[in-house]
Amino acid sequence: MAQEKKIDKERSQRQEIKIADNITGAEYANLMQVMHTREEFRLVFAHLFDPTGKVVCKVTTTPAHFKRMVLAMQENLDLYEKSNGKIMDVESDSAKKIGFE
């Protein structure tokens, strides 16, 4: 009986997430820019293909949620490297200036 109540409570706490009709698939990004203010973080994703590029997505979120995202990405990176081997560090492109700042 207690187990049934626990399962019912878990089901009632689930959220249904719908994908908007205008989101048909994923966008490829090979550049990300991060900016912040006291109240929020903004991530701008772009696809650079010399000599041009295109911003493909912008995400604005709270500092607390940004931190949870960073921790989730680190956890996933650790799992990836455990399964597939360590990703070789690459030279940072942050020194390059690329059209928007």
Image (tube, rainbow, N blue to C red):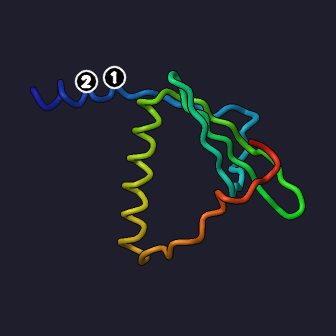
Asked where in the image residue 22 lies, by quadrant, the reply is top right
Mark 2 neighbour density, 10 Å: few (under 14) some (14–19) many (20 or more): few
Residue 62: horizontal and vertical position, in percent? 49, 27
Say how many tags the image has. 2
Instruction: Residue 36 in the image: state x and y as whole percent.
Output: 57, 32
Residue at 48% from the left image edge and 73% from the top image edge: 87
Q: Please name the amino acid that badge 2 sits on.
A: Lys
Label 1: element kind: helix
Instruction: In this rendered view, identify the residue nearer to me: 94 or 12.
Output: 94
Residue furthest to the right in view is 51
Which image quarter: residue 68?
top left
Q: Residue at x 86, y 64 (%)?
A: 50
Q: In the displayed image of the protein, which residue is found farthest to the left?
A: 2
Q: Which residue is mark 2?
A: 9
Q: Is residue 58 left or right of residue 7?
A: right
Q: Are marks 1 and 2 in contact (CB under 8 Å)?
A: yes
Q: Nearer the viewer, residue 82 or 25?
A: 82
Q: Where is residue 1 drawn, in percent x and y? A: 10, 26
Q: Is residue 83 above or below residue 55?
A: below
Q: Which residue is mark 1?
A: 12
Specify whether 95 is left or right of 89: right
57 and 25: which one is in front? 57
Where is 6 relative to 75, above or below? Answer: above
Q: Nearer the viewer, residue 22 or 97?
A: 97
Q: Secondary structure at mark 2?
A: helix
Q: Amino acid at mark 1?
A: Ser
Residue pushed farthest front?
95
Quarter that holds the C terminus:
top right
Tell me what residue is drawn at x 18 percent, y 28 percent.
Answer: 6
